Amino acid sequence: AAVVVTASHNPPAYNGFKVYWENGAQIISPHDVGIAQAIDAAAQGSIECLDMAAGKSQGLLEILGADSAAAYEDAVLERALHPAKERSVRLAYTPLHGVGAKLAEGLLERAGFEVRTVASQREPDGDFPTVNFPNPEEDGAMDAVCALGEEMDADLVCANDPDADRLAVAVKKGPGEYQMLTGDQIGVLLGADRISSAEDKKVAVASSIVSSQMLGKIAKAAGVSFAETLTGFKWLGNYGLAREARGEKFIFGYEEAIGYSVGGLVYDKDGLSALLAFAELADTLAKKGESVLDYLCQLYRQHGLHLTTQQSIALKPGEKAGALCDALRVNMPTQVAGLEVDSVWDLLAPETTPVHMPEPLPASDVLTFYCAGGVRIMVRPSGTEPKVKCYYEICAQMGPEETLESAQSRLQQELAALVERHQGELARLIA
C-alpha cells in the first residue's frame, strides 16, 4: 500500500483521500466496496499501531525519495513526443505553494527549456499566503505568475495546483498580454497533438462526460478509439488500462477541470507530465512559425468552434444534491433554456444511452440534454461538495473571414445567454 498526503483545492470539510489498486489506477467496483467492508470490520476490533521508527526498522515502511523522483523524470522524458536540443519557448511557472516546483523545473530544464518560478510561491506552504484560494482556475490565483511572465517575456505562463496533478496554462497573445486557456482547450490541444503523432491507429483516447465533445470529433476524424467515461480519473485511468489489455495504446485522457493523463505512464491526472507535453507542443509550433492559438484556430475551423462553461448551484442546509435531477425526471422537459430537446441521456436509465457510446456507463445521477443547434447541457450533483453542477457546451462553424478572437466573442455571448436562461429555469424549479 502507498499513502500520499497532499493539499486539496476543495474546502477542508470535504477533503478525503484517494485509494489506488495495484494497477496504479484509483479503485472502482468491486474494490471500493471490499475496502469499505474491511475498514468497517477493522473498526470493530483493536488495531496495533507502530511508530515511524519501528515501521522502518521492521522493513514495513519506506519513505520514497530522490531515487523515485529521478525514475519518474526519466520515464516522463523517455515518452516525450518532441525532444529537441534547442528550445525557443520560455516559461513562467508557479506551484502555488505546493509540491510541484522541483519536479517541474527538473523536467523542463532537462528537456532544454528556460523556466523561471515565482519565488514567493515556490516552497510548500499549507497556509497558501499569497493567494485567496490555491486553485489555478480561480480569479487572481495566477496573477503573480502572469506578472513574472510579463517581466521575462515568457511565451507560456503555467501553474500546477498544490498537489501538482492539474495544469493551468495562459499563452502569450502580445507584449505583456496573456490569454488563459480553458481546461477543454488544453485538453483538445494536447489530445490532437497525441493523436496526430501516433504511429498507428491502434491507440485510444478518452474524456469525461462533462468535458467538451470536440476531442471525440478529432478522434473520429483520425480513426482512433475514443470513449467518454464518468467524471473522475478513476474511470479514465481504468478505461485506459482496459484498452491496453485489448491491445491498444492509451495515449491521452482528460477532464475539463484541468486534469490530464499523457503518454500512458500515469493512469491518473498528472500536472507535471502534462506541463512538459504542453511546453513541447508550443515549442514545436513556434519552430514552424505558429502559435498555440494558431493551432487551436485550425482545429476549430476543422471540427467546429466549441465553447464550454460550468455553473454551480450551492445548496441550502438540508437540501439533497440529487433532488434537482429527481424533479427533472418527474417532468422531463421538452425544452431547455428555450431550445428544443432532441434527446435526453439519463445515466440512471441505460436505454437512453446515445448511439456514440459503445455501451452504457455505470449508473450515475447525471442528466444530459442534447438540444437544437448543437447545444449540450448537463446537470449532476457534486460528488465532493453540497452543490449541483451544470455544464454547458455550444458549437458553431467559424466564418471564413472570422478571426479566432471575434468568433469566440460572438459565441461567448450566446453561451452566456444560454446559461442565464437555464439557471433561471432551475432557480424557479428549486423554488
Image (cartoon, rainbow, N blue to C red):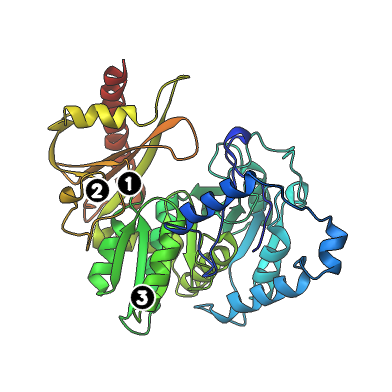
**Circles 1 and 2: CB atoms closer than 8 Å:** yes
Q: Earlier in the sequence, mark 3 or mark 1?
A: 3
Q: Which residue is mark 3?
A: 196
Q: Quadrant of the C terminus?
A: top left
Task: Give the residue at x 51% y 62%.
Answer: 268
Query: Where residue 182 appears, x then y in whole percent?
Result: 44, 49
The quadrant in which residue 139 appears is top right
Q: Mark 2 is on which residue type?
A: Cys
Instruction: Classify 10 Å Cα crowding around label 2: few (below 14), some (14-19), many (20 and above).
Output: many
| Depth check, front residue: 295 or 237 | 237
Q: Quadrant of the N terminus?
A: bottom right
Query: Where residue 86 appears, x then y in whole percent?
Result: 62, 79
Q: Which residue is mark 2?
A: 395
Decide if residue 337 is in sight here: no
SS at badge 1? strand
Task: Give the residue at x 38% y 65%.
Answer: 239
Query: Where residue 287 appears, x then y in whole percent?
Result: 50, 75
Marks 3 and 1, how far apart in space?
Answer: 22 Å
